[in-house]
Image (cartoon, rainbow, N blue to C red):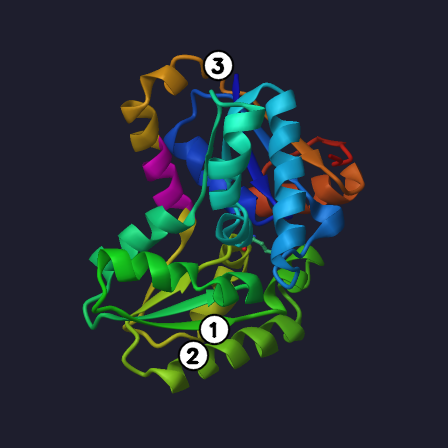
Amino acid sequence: MKIGVFDSGYGGLTILKEIRKRLPQYDYLYLGDNARAPYGSRSFEIVYEFTLQAVKTLFEKDCHLVILACNTASAKALRSIQQKDLPVINPEARVLGVIRPTAEKITSVTSTRHVGLLATPGTVASRSYYLELQKLAPEIIITEHACPMWVPIVENNEILSPGADYFVKKEIDFIFDKDPLIDTLVLGCTHYPILLPVIQKYIPANVKIICQGPIVAESLADYLVRHPEIETVCSKNSGVEYLTTEHPEKFDHLASLFLGHPVESLTISLKD
Ligand code: DGL
């Protein structure tokens, strides 16, 4: 049994990379729904439908544990899938998201208790981070801001273009104007670490950036220790395979750039 890692596109690779660094022994199957990305501006119903298709596909392909390496899918589909679908389609399997472990990390990083969240319109509208923080540390003031252009910049490999600088600076200036006391900036979309060199140019020097890859990797390691019934059925050949709903050549080229090693993917179509 493999561990499935799902994202709307390339963003989940930033999570997969850190998971494989932390837990290299397991076998992974990555699925990017690149042909239908971005998810960030899509409705709740559509993100849920697409995410459920992806989860079912990963189950059919021998995954019994799936990480939604996507905040938008975690915000809009995780709860329904865990509570409504899993008991029917695969009660033994597990699906985990990225928001809860990130919220836990936020509470230990901020000193001013003023936090900025940059994410997709869908994640911001869901208020998932605000709600998680309300449970964990209600004194934290979170300013949530959507960056609708950042995922298209990554998916179209425009990260070195002047347009990337323009849109990154615009959103960062906006959030720090809104709350100058922010000392912790959360990249609440798994695509955003790919823009990190640009983001770093524009944030104030005292601000800490939270990227989710290492947090999710640590949280998965901890989960596997606490759940031996899942851990023992994970195969351990250090393998990784990639599936995309796009043309594989396009995926392989960009995924190789983002991961820093060659990637060979297969195309798949997602249906109910
Ligand atoms: N990478 C995803 C996230 O973390 C989704 C981006 C998108 O498709 O809009 O939210």
Tell which residue pokes out farthest to the bottom in this image. 177
| Image x and y of residue 74, in percent | 49, 48
Is residue 219 one of those drawn in magenta? Answer: yes
Mark 1 or 2, nearer chain start: 1
Instruction: Find numbered disc 3 in the image and state the secondary structure of the residue it sits on.
Output: loop
* Residue corresponding to mark 3: 235
Question: Would the CB of label 1 be found within 8 Å of ligand 1?
Answer: no
Residue at screen point 55% across, 34% down: 85
Q: Which disc is residue 65 wearing?
A: none
- Which kind of residue does numbered mark 3 sit on? Ser
Classify 143 as above or below 49.
below
Residue at screen point 66% across, 45% down: 49
- Which kind of residue does numbered mark 1 sit on? His
Ligand 1 rendered quadrant: bottom right
Apparent side of residue 163 relative to residue 18 in the rendered image (left or right): right
* Quadrant position of the C terminus in the picture: top right
Instruction: Find numbered disc 2 in the image and state the secondary structure of the residue it sits on.
Output: helix
Q: Which residue occupies the foreground of this view, 52 or 72?
A: 52
Q: Is residue 257 visible?
A: no
For the magenta stretch, what is the residue range?
213-220
Number of residues whose C-alpha sits closer than 10 Å to that of mark 3, classed few (under 14), some (14–19) or many (20 or more): some
Number of numbered tags placed on the structure image: 3
- Which kind of residue does numbered mark 2 sit on? Ile
Q: CA distance from mark 1 to mark 2?
A: 7 Å
Residue at screen point 63% across, 69% down: 149
Classify 110 as above or below 205.
above
* Residue corresponding to mark 1: 145
| Image x and y of residue 52, in percent | 62, 39
Mark 3 or 1, nearer chain start: 1
Q: Are marks 1 and 2 in contact (CB under 8 Å)?
A: yes
